[in-house]
Image: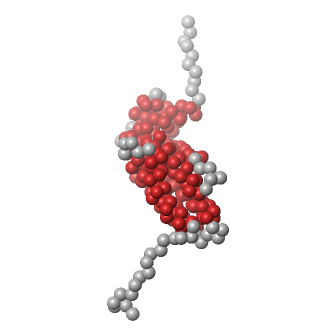
């Protein structure tokens, strides 16, 4: 009786298995502590096969960052329906962001913690992802301003700064939510909306906050 032939798994499928295992190990153990032996074992393949497919630990980590960054950006974009009012668009975008980061904590650890702390080129990959999300949020805020009044006096540079602040807050809140038992994506999104939208809503309606005018002191003329 001849040997039973096993169906060969397509390379693309095998590679995704390796990346799945790598994201879990990198996310839980950190880049420096993770070993290719652990990754190969979890993926159910030999270590030489991991090297054959993905060349090196550095290349494997970069591939993980690119895949997870792309998945996060796609999740946020897919979560927003552009026919909704601006506040609903932002709400849905935040909900999609926190849902994705909550359902993929190892991937978020790779993007938010590991990639940023091990230098180039890893940090550059995350920066590219972050810039894409900031640009998307910038456009949401600009669209909301146009919706609120026909000729918004909101310089795009200022709006970009608001988007940077909002994305930074979302990143920190996602890390907190993942580390805090019982916090749902809905709760995290509501927290950030309550924090941000009161100010953004007034700004879009042409009622920006302004610092009080400085009063002349006793020694000023």
| Quadrant in which residue 11 is drawn | top right
In this picture, is 50 found above or below 116? above
Q: At which x and y percent is residue 105?
A: 44, 42
Between 97 and 186, the one lying in front of the other is 186
Instruction: Give the residue drawn at x 61%, y 56%.
Output: 85
Q: At which x and y percent is residue 9?
A: 57, 26
Q: At which x and y percent is residue 211?
A: 44, 75
- In the image as oriented, which residue stretches furthest toward the bottom? 221
Instruction: Give the residue drawn at x 56%, y 56%.
Output: 87
Instruction: Give the residue drawn at x 56%, y 9%.
Output: 2
Between 110 and 100, the one lying in front of the other is 100
Instruction: Give the residue drawn at x 57%, y 16%.
Output: 5
Q: At which x and y percent is residue 46?
A: 46, 29
In this picture, is 126 found above or below 181? below
In this picture, is 207 found above or below 97? below
Give the quadrant of the C terminus. bottom left
């Amino acid at each position: 009786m001849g040997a039973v032939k096993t169906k060969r798994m397509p390379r693309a499928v095998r590679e995704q298995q390796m990346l799945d295992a790598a994201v879990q190990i990198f996310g839980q153990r950190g880049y420096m502590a993770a070993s290719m032996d652990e990754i190969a074992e979890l993926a159910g393949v030999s270590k030489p096969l991991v090297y054959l497919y993905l060349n090196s630990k550095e290349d494997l980590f970069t591939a993980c960052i690119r895949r997870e960054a792309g998945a996060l950006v796609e999740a946020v974009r897919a979560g927003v329906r552009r026919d909704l009012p601006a506040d609903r668009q932002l709400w849905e975008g935040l909900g999609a962001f926190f849902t994705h980061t909550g359902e993929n904590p190892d991937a978020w650890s790779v993007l938010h913690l590991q990639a940023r702390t091990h230098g180039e080129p890893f940090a550059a990959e995350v920066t590219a992802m972050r810039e894409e999300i900031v640009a998307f949020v910038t456009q949401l805020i600009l669209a909301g301003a146009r919706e609120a009044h026909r000729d918004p006096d909101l310089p795009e540079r200022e709006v970009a700064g608001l988007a940077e602040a909002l994305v930074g807050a979302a990143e920190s809140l996602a890390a907190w939510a993942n580390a805090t038992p019982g916090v749902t994506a809905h709760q995290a999104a509501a927290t950030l909306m309550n924090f941000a939208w009161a100010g953004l809503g007034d700004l879009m309606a042409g009622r920006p906050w302004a610092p009080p005018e400085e009063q002349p002191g006793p020694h000023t003329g």
